[in-house]
C-alpha cells in the first residue's frame, strides 16, 4: 500500500497548482505593491515561501537565472500550469513580484 502514497501526493500537488481557477482580479488589484505580500498570496502555494518548493511543474525560484524582464514576462503571460497574471495584477505589482522573486535566489 505504501507505493501508492507518492503518486497520490504528486497528483494532489498537480491539481492544487493547476486548479484552473484564477485568483480574483478585484481582491488582487486592491493589494499594494509589496512584492513579498503579493508573492505570499499568489505564488507561495506552488513555489513555497522561499521559492524552492517546486510543487507540480513549479520551478525552483531559488536557483533561477532569469532576468527581471524574463520574470515579468512569465508572470504576465503565464507558462505551463501557471496562470497569466496580466489581467489580475497591475504592472507595478508584477514588477514588485519580479524583484521579490530575484531576492529569493540563493547566494553562493
Image (cartoon, helix red, strand yellow):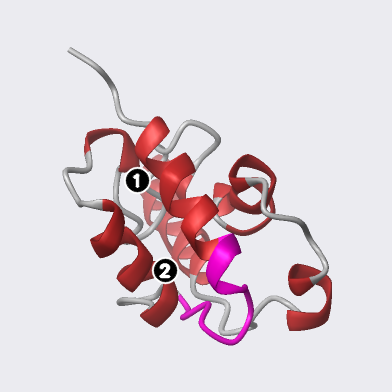
Of the pair 58 and 97, the residue shown nearer to us: 97
Which is the main secondary structure of the residues drawn in magenta?
A: loop
Answer with mark 1 or mark 2, whichever residue precedes in sequence.
1
Q: How far apart are the two marked residues, 1 and 2, measured between alpha carbons?
A: 36 Å
Instruction: Give the structural element (helix, strand or loop) at label 1.
Output: helix
Residue 89 among those drawn in magenta: yes
Q: Which residue is mark 1?
A: 3
> Measuring 34% from the left and 45% from the top, which residue is drawn there?
3
Judged from this view, the residue extending furthest toward the top is 108
- Callout 1 environment at 10 Å: few (<14), some (14 to 19), or many (20+)? few
Above/below status of 31 relative to 104 = below
In the rendered picture of this protein, how many numbered marks are placed on residues? 2
Left or right: residue 54 compared with residue 32: left
Above/below status of 77 relative to 34 = below
Q: Position of residue 29 (x, y in %)?
A: 75, 73
> Measuring 47% from the left and 31% from the top, which residue is drawn there?
50
Q: Is residue 1 visible?
A: no
Range of the magenta residues? 83-93
Q: Which residue is mark 2?
A: 75
Q: In the picture, residue 78 is in which quadrant?
A: bottom left
Instruction: Give the structural element (helix, strand or loop) at label 2.
Output: helix
> Measuring 33% from the left and 42% from the top, which residue is drawn there?
61
Above/below status of 104 relative to 9 = above
Name the quadrant of the C terminus: top left
Please identify, in this view, whether the residue under mark 1 or under mark 2 is nearer the observer: 2
Residue 47 among those drawn in magenta: no
Amino acid at each position: 500500500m505504501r507505493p501508492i502514497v507518492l503518486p497520490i501526493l504528486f497528483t494532489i500537488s498537480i491539481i492544487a497548482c493547476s486548479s484552473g481557477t484564477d485568483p480574483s482580479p478585484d481582491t488582487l488589484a486592491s493589494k499594494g505593491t509589496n512584492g513579498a505580500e503579493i508573492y505570499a498570496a499568489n505564488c507561495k502555494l506552488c513555489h513555497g515561501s522561499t521559492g524552492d518548493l517546486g510543487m507540480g511543474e513549479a520551478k525552483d525560484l531559488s536557483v533561477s537565472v532569469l532576468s527581471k524582464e524574463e520574470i515579468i514576462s512569465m508572470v504576465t503571460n503565464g507558462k505551463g500550469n501557471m496562470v497569466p497574471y496580466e489581467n489580475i495584477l497591475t504592472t507595478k505589482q508584477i514588477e514588485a513580484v519580479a524583484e521579490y522573486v530575484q531576492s529569493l535566489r540563493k547566494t553562493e
